[in-house]
Image (cartoon, grey):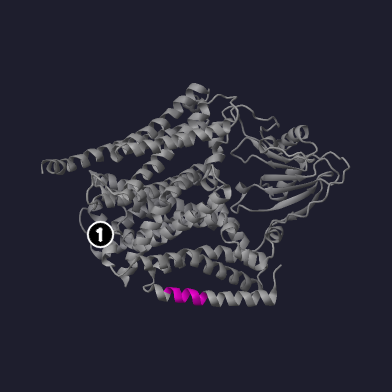
Amino acid sequence: MAGRTTGNRQGIGRGEVAARIVAAIPANYLLTSLATACLARLLWRGFGVDPANASTAATLTSFALFAVLALVAFAMRSAARLWLWMVASGAVLGGALWLSLASGGRL
Amino acid sequence: MIHLLPLAIAIAAFVALAVSMKRHQRDFVGRLLPEPQARLARVTGWLLLGVVWAIDAALLGPAMGTLVWIGEASMGAWLTVAAITWKAAR
Amino acid sequence: MKDGLRQSMALLHTWSGLLIGWLLFAMFATGTAAYFQDEITRWMQPEVTGPADPAASAQGAVRFLNTVAPDAKSWYISLPNSRAATTQVYWQPGGERPAKRGETSALLDQSGHEITTRETRGGFFLYRFHFDLHYMPVLWARYLVGIAAMFMLVAILSGVITHKKIFADFFMLRFGKGQRSWLDAHNVTAVLALPFHLMITFTGLVTLAVMYMPWGIAANYASQDTFYETFLGRSETAEASGKTVPLADLGTMVRTASAQWQGRRVGYISISNPNDAAAQVDMSRAPEAAFGARGESVTFAGATGRMTGAHDATGAALATESVMIGLHTGRFARWGLRWLYFLSGIGGTIMVGSGLVLWTVKRRARLPDPARPHFGFLLVERLNIAAIAGLATGIAAYFLANRLLPLEMADRAEREIDCMFLAWLAVGLWGMVRPAARAWAETLALAGACFAAIPVVNALTTGRGLVPSLLAGDWTFAGFDLVMLALAAGFVLASAKAAKARARVGNRRAPSARRAASS
């Protein structure tokens, strides 16, 4: 099944595959890390969960998030749109994390 | 020992589920079943799996019961596959 | 769009599966064996008999430690669980002189005598191998294993998306149909234990979560140690006072701790500043005693034996993590569930193995010239032989070495492990030099023969062979030998199938070869 698909997708070049692999692994890790850190902060500072449980809950979620993002990186039709989304959400999460750390600090 | 009864019911459940699938009806009944009967088999299969869960949960508590249920269901499915494969090969 | 999604998921499934398939196979195989690590250890220490009582074992350990390291900075005692008989002790020597790792640990029986014959790492090695690997730094190994587990998670999810249809007709294996049979085997093993595969992969990542995803903790804590102190409840260790006071009876403390936890077993004891007025004893509950792997702990003042503190991690997320680790390791599982774990693990191993073989089977038909495949195909085919038949032979060699190496050999435990990898390497090389189809039949037969030899060698070298064990009702030993025979039968059967497939492929290829020769 899998092997034959390359023929139907003549439009996909090496560049696009590389873009998706980079998005699915290193960029995904970066984005997931940011999201995990933000979630840990949000649960603790925002919802009043104790920090140990907040950190653990965020860590447990992170693996599911990474796996789903890896699938999305290959499922989205346009690699350009994919990257746009990733960069945008990364910027938002990074900004939020920076603000939260600057205002709240860590234990 | 406590796995025997749930396992037997799980096998019955998967046989029922297999009977509800077109591809396996030939092996079990020798002909295609009309849709109402297939649906009955499907519902019976899921109900029996529910019964297995209820037994496990009652005996072992919901957490351990669910875990054991997954294991027994896997085993039951394996034995069903073995039976179907063996039957189809003859 | 829908087709596009299926195609991209199929590609993802194929390539993420292939890339780490060999490592995953080894992790699944040795991890599955680890469900019986205590039984394997007992089989590999035939001189040790009988169960062990935790309180008596703790007292025995203290007697031993008092003779070898009375002035140590700290003692660590890992008590036997209900399936094991031996106590593992470590100590951190006092004074400045550095000590080698082998000189600060010992394996004891219940009465505190060091076990010196037939030094072995037993089933514990297989357990550690499935996430620490060997001959490489543990840290690298764990990152590799984590990457493999994440690929596995992605491969499972993309596999489900690609092959939704398999849920409609997965109840049959068709044997002897080439590619179709391999696809059936892969699908059936995948679907029937899908909850297990998802659970084991996800919880596997969770066991080393802090290493793979430290940022959740880093976001709230400046130092990881602070995090650990809050949830493990480890209190600050006091400085030694310099005044010598012998340690109070550890057996009593073990019974007190156990009573505190409604009779659950004590698993692990650490003692700082033993035989000092400031001695402190920390005990944690045995992982096998409850669903959650991480649990309650208590602290005693070592000099008086009075309980000074008790701790239990609380909170939904911490409890979830603890249960996830418990689910992965299955330490709480009794016999029935333990066998279900083991069989599911075997199913997972077959799923990974059949997936690897499927990659070559699918592509062989489409090779431009099947007699001379391209390099990538050859590489995958050879690595499959090395990974599957090689590892199996290696594990069998590990068990055989345990019975055949001289009992008093220096570094014996390490040599047993070397035997495993040497056998693995030898089979891998054999697979490189022989024609692939022939190599499959030969190496699988070799694996089968090695597994079959284990009960024979066991009966010849110890008094605990299959027949005496069965007569004595010793199910640990009898069960081990019977599983070896079952594995032997499985590999011989697989070898016969491979030989038959080779004959079929040979017949099909012959006419075309003749045509090629005559033209």
Q: Which residue is mark 1?
A: B22
Q: Is residue C21 left or right of residue C286?
A: left
- Disc 1: host chain: B
Please state which of residues C364 and C239 is positioned toward the viewer in this rendering: C364
Quarter that holds the C terminus of chain A? bottom right
Seen from this angle, which residue lies furthest right? C243
Q: Is residue C401 left or right of residue C68?
A: left
Going 89% across and 42% down the picture, which residue do you hit? C243
Tell me residue C451's x, y (percent): 42, 32
Please state which of residues C281 and A16 is positioned toward the viewer in this rendering: A16
Image-quadrant location for residue C2: bottom left
Please state which of residues C70 and C41 is positioned toward the viewer in this rendering: C70
* Residue C281 drawn above or below residue C492: below
Q: Label 1 amino acid?
A: Lys
| Magenta region, residue range | A82-89
Going 68% across and 65% down the picture, which residue do you hit? C221
Give yes or no for residue C369 being in the magenta stretch.
Answer: no
Give yes or no for residue A83 being in the magenta stretch.
Answer: yes
Magenta span: chief secondary structure? helix
* Residue C179 drawn above or below residue A17: above
* Residue B11 drawn above or below residue A46: above
Tell me residue C203's x, y (percent): 53, 56
Classify 10 Å Cα crowding around label 1: few (below 14), some (14-19), many (20 and above): some
Quarter that holds the N terminus of chain A? bottom left
> SS of the residue at dot 1?
helix
Going 45% across and 51% down the picture, which residue do you hit? B71
Tell me residue C169's x, y (percent): 30, 57
Tell me residue C103's x, y (percent): 69, 35
